[in-house]
Structures are given as structure tokens and as C-alpha cells.
Amino acid sequence: MQQINVFEALFGKQGEVLVESLDSDLKFCTGVFKNGMFEKRIHTIGEFVRQVNATEIPYLNTECQPAFKMLLPKIPGGMLNALEVFYTYVSNTVKSEVAAQIFWDTVNQDYVLHVPIQQVTGSTVRYDRKNGMFVDPRYVCVCNSHSHNTFGRYYS
């Protein structure tokens, strides 16, 4: 009788499941630890580790924690400063929110600051994510941000 690896049948050779480890170079890996199940995904941007399930497994010894490891260079400080200046300018002159993205150009190996065509108000911003750089495989969205006009700074 032939044995079937169910995980491999579902996901091919892109991922694997390990016990008390996420030590894998595959695209994704699930690890079972004392404090639950964690998943590591390797993406162009970096390695992301998130907790999938918080079930305590008393017979295991090793715990895991959510984490992120950037695989790209740091976003240039000047680009982040330019975003702040742009957001402040729009808030002061147009009195609205506005959105911008930072993409990684996989061909030129550099960051690109992008401001899409958008509809804005004092409390909302809308733009098309189904065209242009958002769907071009050459570009990877690393930072998707928007201003809050007169609202405070917080994650939204």
C-alpha cells in the first residue's frame, strides 16, 4: 500500500509541518509548539511568523512568538519624510485624507513612491487597486498608507 503525504498532496513542495521548529526554507511552514500552532511565510518583503492557534500543548517544551524579519533593504528615511510632508500639505491645503504606497521594484531593486489617482474627503480615501502597479508582478507593495487629515495618528 502506498503512503500519501496529505500536506504534500494539498500544498506540493511549497511548505511543510514541523514540531517545535520553523526552521525551513520552503515558502511556508507550520510549526506546533508548547503555546500553539505558528505559521512562517517567506515573501519578497520578509519572513512573517504568526500564531494560528493558541492551544496549550503541555507535552512540548519549546514556545514560539510572532515575528517579522525584513528581507529587503530598509525604506529610505527621505522617502518616509517625503510622505509626511505630502500628507501635511494635502491636509493643510485640500483638507482631506490622501493615500500613497511604497513599492519594491523587483527589476531595478529599489523602492518607488506611488500616489494613485484617488477620491478623497476629510475622512475617507478611495482608489483602484485592480490596475497599474498593484497588479504588475514587477512591483511588490511594501507599505500601503494614508493620512488622517485632522484625526490623530493610529492604525486604521
Image: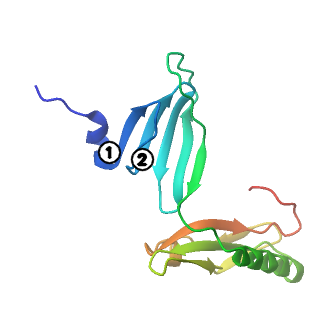
- Residue shown at 44% from the left, 38% from the top: 30
Q: Taking 86 as reference, is 35 above or below it?
A: above
Please state if 94 lies on the left or on the right of 55 as rendered.
right
Considering the numbered disc 1 on the image, is that residue within a helix, a strand or a loop?
helix
User: Quarter-wise, where is residue 18 in the image?
Assistant: top left
Image coordinates of residue 106 in percent, x first then y, are: 46, 74
- Residue shown at 54% from the left, 73% from the top: 104
Q: Does the CB distance between marks 2 and 1 fall below 8 Å?
A: yes
Considering the numbered disc 2 on the image, is that residue within a helix, a strand or a loop?
strand
Using the image as rendered, state which of residue 29 and residue 137 is in the foreground. Answer: 29
Please state if 132 lies on the left or on the right of 15 as rendered.
right
The residue carrying mark 1 is 11
The residue carrying mark 2 is 28
Amino acid beneath label 2? Phe
Amino acid beneath label 1? Phe
Q: Is residue 128 visible?
A: no
- Residue shown at 75% from the left, 55% from the top: 155
**Disc with the residue nearer the chain's start (2 vs 1):** 1
Disc 2 residue crowd, few under 14, some 14–19, many 20+, Cα 10 Å: many
